[in-house]
Amino acid sequence: MFGFIKKSLQKTVDAIKTVAPKKKITISKDELEDILLEADVEYALVEIILNEIYQEKITRDILRSKLLATLAYTSYKEPDYTAPFVELIVGVNGAGKTTTISKLAARYKNEGKKVVLGAGDTFRAAAIEQLTLWAKKLDIPIISSKQGHDSSAVAYDTIESAKSKGYDNVIIDTAGRLHTQTNLANELKKINRICAKAHEGAPHRTILIVDGTQGNSAIAQAKAFNEMIGIDGIIITKLDGTAKGGSIFSIAYALELPILYVGTGEQPENLTPFDKYEFVEGLLDAIFEEEQSSQV
């Protein structure tokens, strides 16, 4: 019935089964509380959901409406722009930025678009090398410099190259960590300014990469990046490797930002557009008997 998102929720489903081993037609509030907490939904959000349910017996339809309400901000509207479309990718080291950039690039290329990458994480030599390897594997051009060089200059050169060669998409990597948060904020703000000088409206979309295995601890991290630079959307990585899938509700609710994609594996094709209906139904299937399901 469903695809990659439901499959990637298996570890979260297994965690739910530890507190709710038997599927039911209805569940109590106490049972729901245990289920949501086991799936790593933040306690404050669990309290909000429970307080908004007045029925003693909770059905699949009742819970569906409450869970979908927490994902009200997940829709995204692409801004008006003149090509190339410039995306800035931000996030801490280890979240999966480089791999996600390769997945985005592969996705655009498969759509027939011309893509160029910018190796803007000049803080780590390994980041430049890793992105260069992906670019070669995907046969996509990359603009890079040496470790320690000005990352904003890389961003500028990448955009200028894309404009001169008629490219459709520019994806720019950024450093995930500098010596202090102030340094990181200053660098990201500078890259933003330089992108705007290179091309009107750029960056057109700033995407935060969030490690799904971090669960709710990623919320504070995401808020910090949003305050630094302003985030337009989120990509959740490693969803297939965590039992903390419920944290997506908390992240979306706390940040009021759209979740654009989820990473569901290591291969370039394992980047799936986030579908809140499929995501919610995947969790509901773990709680309620199949015959009680209804079409959305």
Image (cartoon, rainbow, N blue to C red):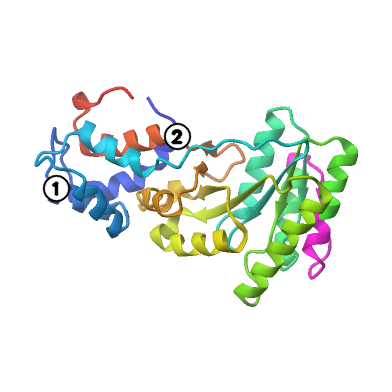
What residue do we see at 51% from left, 59% from top?
A: 222
Quadrant of the frame with the N terminus: top left
Residue 216 as seen in the image, left or right of residue 147? left
In this view, the residue in front, 225 or 105, is: 225
Q: Nearer the viewer, residue 264 or 283?
A: 283
| Residue 233, magenta (yes or no) | no
In the image, what residue type sits under mark 1? Lys
Instruction: Identify the disc placed on residue 29.
Output: 1
Measured as percent of width and height from the top left, residue 54 is found at: 14, 42
Residue bearing mark 2? 275
Residue drawn where x is 61% and y is 48% of the image = 100
Q: Is residue 73 visible?
A: yes
Q: Is residue 123 above or below residue 28?
A: below
Local crowd size for mark 1, using a 10 Å CA cut-off: few (<14), some (14–19), many (≥20): some
Q: What stretch is highlighted in magenta?
A: 138-155
What is the distance, in whole Å, between disc 2 and disc 1 at their CAs? 26 Å
Query: Mark 2 touching mark 1, by CB under 8 A?
Result: no
Quarter holding the C terminus?
top left
Question: Residue 62, position in %: x, y?
Answer: 21, 35
Whether residue 178 is situated above or below residue 171 in the rendered picture: below
